[in-house]
Amino acid sequence: MKEENKKCWSCGRFQRFYTQGYCNFQKENIGFCYFQNKIVDKAESCKMWNYCQRVRNMRKQMAISSIIDIRSKLEVIEQILIEETKLNKIKNEK
């Protein structure tokens, strides 16, 4: 991963702080680094940056579900084309 993308906000050891609003929680630009054991800004970086495994697993699961959905849609299109081809053959035989 590029060096500029290795910021604290994308590190697996970073826990973002939130403030409670009226109806929701607002993201803060600071959080807690479990490696350095201190409060850091989200734009900081360090040599011990670690890829966030949760994000990777979530992206992987989303990709798998998208592929399954696309496959089922392609099967429907395939069936339509097969039926249309059969219908055209029958019309051409007459």
Image: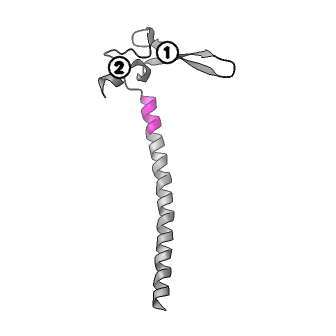
- List x then y, in percent, for residue 19: 60, 14
Tag nearer the camera, 1 or 2? 1
Sequence-first tag of 1 and 2: 1
Q: Position of residue 79 (x, y in %)?
A: 49, 69
Residue under numbered circle 1: 29
Residue 63's spot in the image, x, y percent? 45, 44
Q: Is residue 34 above or below residue 50?
A: above
Residue 34 in magenta stretch: no
Residue positioned 42% across, 24% down in the render: 10
Crowd band around label 2 with a 10 angstrom C-alpha radius: few (<14), some (14–19), many (20+):
some
- Rendered residue at 44%/16% (across/down): 42
In magenta, the rendered stretch is 49-59
Which of the 4 image quarters holds residue 45?
top left
Q: Name the residue furthest top.
A: 38
Furthest toward the right, the residue is: 22
**Residue at the bottom extreme of this rendering:** 94
Determine the residue positioned at 38% across, 20% down: 7
The residue where tag 2 is placed is 49
Rendered residue at 35%/22% (across/down): 6
Q: Main secondary structure of the magenta part?
A: helix
Count of marks, rendered view: 2
